[in-house]
Amino acid sequence: MSIHFINKACVFVKLCSLLLFSSSLFAETSLMPLPQSFERQTGELRLPSQIEFSFEGFSDQRKEFQAKRLELHLTRIAKHKVTLIDLANNKKQTPDNATLKVIVRDKESDLLVPQLNNDESYQLVINQNGITINANTVFGAQHGLTTLTQLAANHCDNQLILPHAIITDAPRFAWRGLLIDSARHFLSIETIKRQLNTMASAKLNVLHWHLTDDQGWRIESKRFPRLTDMASDGLFYKQSEVKDFVEYAALLGIRVVPEFGMPGHASAIAVAYPELMAEVKPYEMERHWGVFKPLLDISKPEVYQFVDSLIEEMTGIFPDQYLHIGGDEVEPEQWLNNKDIQALMAKHSLKNGHDLQNYFNTQIQPIIAKHQRIMMGWDEIFHQDLPKDIVVQSWRGHDSLNEVANSGHLGILSTGFYIDQPQYSDYHYRNDPLRKLPQVDLSKSLLLAKSFVIDRLKGSDVKGELVVLGEQVLIKLNNNHHQLALVNKAPNQSTNAFKAKMDSWMGPLTFEFDLKGETSAVMIGNSRYPIKLSTLNVPSEISLSRPLKNKNAANILGAEATIWSEMVTDDNIDLRIWPRLYVISERLWSTKHINDANDMYQRLRFINTYAAEVIGAAHLAQQKAGFNALLPKSFDKYKKAHTLALLNVMAELLEPAHYYTRHHIKYLNDEYHQEAPLNLFVDYLNVESEQVRQIKRWMLAYTAGDADSLTQLDKQLIKWQKGFEMGLETLSSSKKLSELKPTLISLSQFIGLSQQVISSCKGEIKGTGLDEQLLDLQKLTDELVIAGIYPMRDLYLACTEQ
């Protein structure tokens, strides 16, 4: 969302937001995540600048922390100093006289560290007598304070005015997390603490800290000092820092789950302790991104001694009951070439790399349990021989997660929540850990079968099958099950082309199947990939996902979003996480029936500003700083302002390429490594453009019969056109800026073609081939995407069909 629209967010909410809470209508308020029950009552409560409060059941440390936090947030909302006065320090007053009363049933004496399945429910009552929050635990009470702060921010006129209301609330899922990868690009403690603050404002409760990987070991080990001496580049967290960090997280109600990757993703261990590896040799620090070969030698007793001692040390730092071992993407080559491991295979009748990894997991799980921790890992650790209380984190998708849960094991979902990938928020919003499968009628006649290939820029092609059964369109990708797709029209024997939509691990997919020609393609988010379509004489037997059994639904604990750091640094991490993570938080907190994407986007505009101005998230500041960094220091004040205005207008129509397209482009350009700079215009762009979404709304409104929407669109195009005037001259001022000149030329061409589309729709001209001309403006190998191309093309095609 650009600065141009953000400043209007509060006004927009006032005019447009009519949100349905439980059985009552509560207008002009945006909350995220939405509470389970909201009863709006008559009246408002005006808060003074000095608010008397009483927190019953909090430890002294938590009370002081939460009071200061609330005081800061209310001050930022009111834009003048707000002071909280603790009645516990006033002998003349009793807690009953407090304007704000928080009452916790299970009292906390010393600071509690949150654990899985803490009671996080609360009730918030606002009336003429003041504010009362009742909760069973301090963690629920803090969520009540979070809701209170959002309510206060909704008033929008620098006054602390709250509606009289009763809110009763509790989370849908117990595990609501974010994985932060500090291994690939080191992130400062200050940066990660800032994420904790914003996570708490979204009612998230788990930070999964990815501390080790091929590119670095990021936490001090006093028992194995070579890990940081040789494999961190001096960039690591001291144990004292981490203990302070864990305590800070506990004050916010957030668990910290550490991850120490093994037996793969172990290049950093190999650099420090090569004698522990399946292939003993000197290793150098790995600078590139990808999957690499070093593996722990699982036949050596010394490896298990290392793991035992390391875990014992780390449990003294991380009090959470779960410990993550990674366990993903194991390339077995080093194991299969090792004579000792070959002997191990023969002794235990192990057939392949998967069996070897299972063997390793069964050896280290008792070690982890010995230290009073529960093992957690990615899909690859799953095995029936492991105890039911292990937690499997799924990056392979719902099918894998459901298999885990149906077996009686515990699982959490991460597929569909990979926010290091640019993806649209509504894609994440649809992604429910308890996915409900649509019904497929397999008795229908086979009308069509095609095979296709999506040629990716890096890695293996995605192979697929298109099968039409009656009016049902099924799509199979790689070795996954067939999935029912949504179509714009049911294809038949005479159909030449049609569209089909579905969500996948790559993101939202929109297929354009050209059954008679060579122009089939698929949109993965905003990136358009060509498809090679072929006749399929013998289609695969239809294979459908196995549903999650109702009795096993409780085995799915929740989900974690992930922010892998190949393309992330201290300078842009907030911009990649926020505000999208609020959307994921709502999916994990609120009832599953809250799923209106349009309503979500309306509230998200408010939350976007709220996160920055009240909570202190840095996503808006990072974009501003990133754009400023592109300007030469020699620019005077006027030239800086003029250039920034141009960049902001360009940013309204541009998005970074979605999915892993940018990663693959970097790979092709030999820039896919740790030392590649991430300081380009694209690195500071929003993942999704509010203005492009508005183009889509106008397009849909026009096709639904609203002729005025074309006029509004045309006026906006003229504004953008004026914003681009003198742009080429401005961008010629420096080398960094001049790299954007081809993009500006394409943007200007886009405006011109869009105006022709509107004229064509009005019947003023007979525009031909405008769809192809629009597509020609964008190459798959461009990191910057003119995302408005695609709704304008849809508008043109709709008008052409009419």
Image: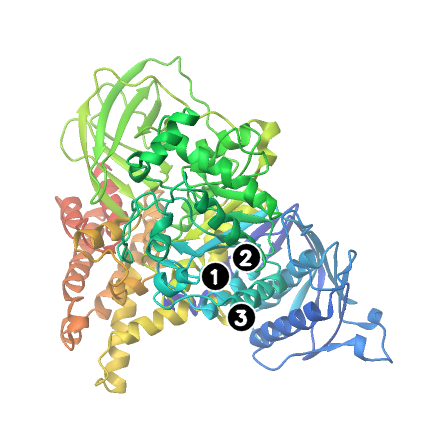
- State the separation of the CA atoms marked 1 and 3: 37 Å
Q: Nearer the viewer, mark 1 or mark 3?
A: 1
Residue name at image x 38 percent, y 42 percent: 297
Q: Count neighbours of disc 1 (C-alpha within 10 A) and say few if under 14, some if 14 to 19, many if 20 or more.
A: some
Task: Please report contact status of discs 2 and 3: CB closer than 8 Å, yes or no.
Answer: no
- Residue type (three-letter) at the residue carrying disc 1: Ser
Depth check: give the residue in front, 669 or 726: 669
Residue picked out by circle 3: 614
On screen, residue 632 above or below 523 = below
Q: Earlier in the sequence, mark 2 or mark 1?
A: 1
Residue picked out by circle 2: 313
Specify the quadrant that holds the N terminus.
bottom left
Residue name at image x 28 percent, y 56 percent: 286
Looking at the rendered structure, the secondary structure element under dot 3 is helix
Depth check: give the residue in front, 66 or 376: 376
Residue picked out by circle 1: 221
Where residue 426 sits: x, y (%)?
A: 42, 47
Looking at the rendered structure, the secondary structure element under dot 2 is helix
- Residue type (three-letter) at the residue carrying disc 2: Glu
Where residue 733 sits: x, y (%)?
A: 15, 78
Task: Please report contact status of discs 2 and 1: CB closer than 8 Å, yes or no.
Answer: yes
Q: Is residue 281 left or right of residue 351?
A: left
Q: Count neighbours of disc 2 (C-alpha within 10 A) and say few if under 14, some if 14 to 19, many if 20 or more.
A: some
Q: Earlier in the sequence, mark 2 or mark 3?
A: 2
Determine which of the numbered discs, if any, sits on residue 405 in the image.
none
Q: Is residue 606 left or right of residue 656?
A: right
